[in-house]
Amino acid sequence: MYYHTLLTIIDKLPKELIESFDLYLARLTINQKQQIDISHVSIKLGIEYEVAEKLLNMCHKIKLVKKYPVIMCPVCERKIEETNYNNLYSDLKKDYFCSHCDEEELNVTTDNVYIFYKLLKKPDPNFNNKKNIEKKNNTKSIENKSFTQKILLSTEELYDFLYSPSEKNYDEMTKKLNSIDANYENTTDKGTSLNDLIIYLLNRCNPFKATKLVITETNQFDCTVVNEIYIDIEKVMPKESIGKISFLNEMGSIFLCECKNEEKTPKGTYFQKLHSILVQNKLTFGIIFSKFPPPTTYKILARETYLTSNIIIISIDKIDLEKIIIDKKNFFEIIKLKIIEVKTNSTTDLSSTELI
Ligand SMILES: [Zn+2]
């Protein structure tokens, strides 16, 4: 094999498929290695589009290829800008000019985003024998290929579009997560450590702007978050795709968070306090972040609160934070799951269902 890394996924897909994909990669030209697309793989390997997508996404996970979005011209469908998931949200708010067809002030949405993959690795040295690679490469140049298949962002990709921290961001979050367990001389510093982590995490979410400690005449909030999806959504996303992330609407244009870094189960009064602040401010969504898991009463209170006042309060504890930061689970998947739990009063584990 040319790319030995592929052996790590050999038990997840048919062996013949992995082998022909290995050869496919080895035969690509330098340019083609920079922009591999799902339909090309699907045609060349004679496999279903979904299988090709699964294969490429697996290769992205093992860091053989890197998945990246490209903004295409809505008029001529040629490349306008190569970007990354971290910047895509803000990029879609810009006005574009297409140098290919001279169209100006182009309004681009997620519908004009195509997904490509670039090969990150060179063939393993022992296998880099040119004799083994057929010289004549019969694959058509991807550059000149006209796109017959529009690649819409899937639900999973929409999550990445909303939240896609870099490795550096993950390192910083891990550091901050570890710091909530440190020994502090006073409770304020201890509390601040969790608050800092949460502000950092929320600000990694592309539609959110989170700020620490807003003090009003009557209250102080640990963390106030502006959910900009309200302002941006029609600019960046076509109506059909909005349904997939409609849970963001449940969070309202502003929501509040409480952070409790205590060495015990958070008190029931924290829930009631956050609830009353939300009511006073006509807000509809809140999150209680705590080190310890919430008491069972939170679930009952959350359900009652939702039924009586349409306010949703979810809780996120250290176990959830570890899933987000250490296991790199998408933060929005966790939020959506928690919202569904409150709304459906479910007692089953929803994380493995199709709802997410
Ligand atoms: Zn154009």
Image (spheres, rainbow, N blue to C red):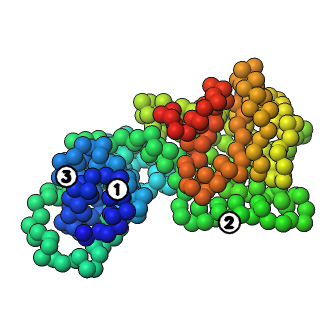
Residue at horizontal 75 percent and vertical 45 percent from the top: 293
Q: Earlier in the sequence, mark 2 or mark 1?
A: 1
The residue carrying mark 1 is: 11
Q: Earlier in the sequence, mark 3 or mark 2?
A: 3
CA gap, disc 3 and disc 1: 18 Å
- Using a 10 Å C-alpha cutoff, classify the residue at mark 2 as few (fewer than 14 neighbours), some (14 to 19) or many (20 or more): few
Residue at horizontal 35 percent and vertical 43 percent from the top: 112
Q: Quadrant of the N terminus?
A: bottom left
- Using a 10 Å C-alpha cutoff, classify the residue at mark 3 as few (fewer than 14 neighbours), some (14 to 19) or many (20 or more): some
Asked which secondary structure carries label 1, the reply is loop
Residue at horizontal 81 percent and vertical 36 percent from the top: 271
Q: Position of residue 204 (x, y in %)?
A: 60, 53
In this rendering, does residue 77 appear at all? Answer: no
Q: In the drawing, does residue 95 fall left or right of residue 197?
A: left
Asked which secondary structure carries label 2, the reply is helix
User: What amino acid type should be assigned to the residue bearing mark 2?
Assistant: Lys
CA gap, disc 2 and disc 1: 34 Å
Asked whether 160 or 337 is in front, the reply is 337
Q: Position of residue 141 (x, y in %)?
A: 17, 58
The residue carrying mark 2 is: 175
- Using a 10 Å C-alpha cutoff, classify the residue at mark 1 as few (fewer than 14 neighbours), some (14 to 19) or many (20 or more): few
Q: Quadrant of residue 19?
A: bottom left
Asked which secondary structure carries label 3, the reply is helix
Task: Nearest to the eye among marks 3 and 2: give it.
Answer: 3
Question: Residue 45 bears which disc, if any?
Answer: 3
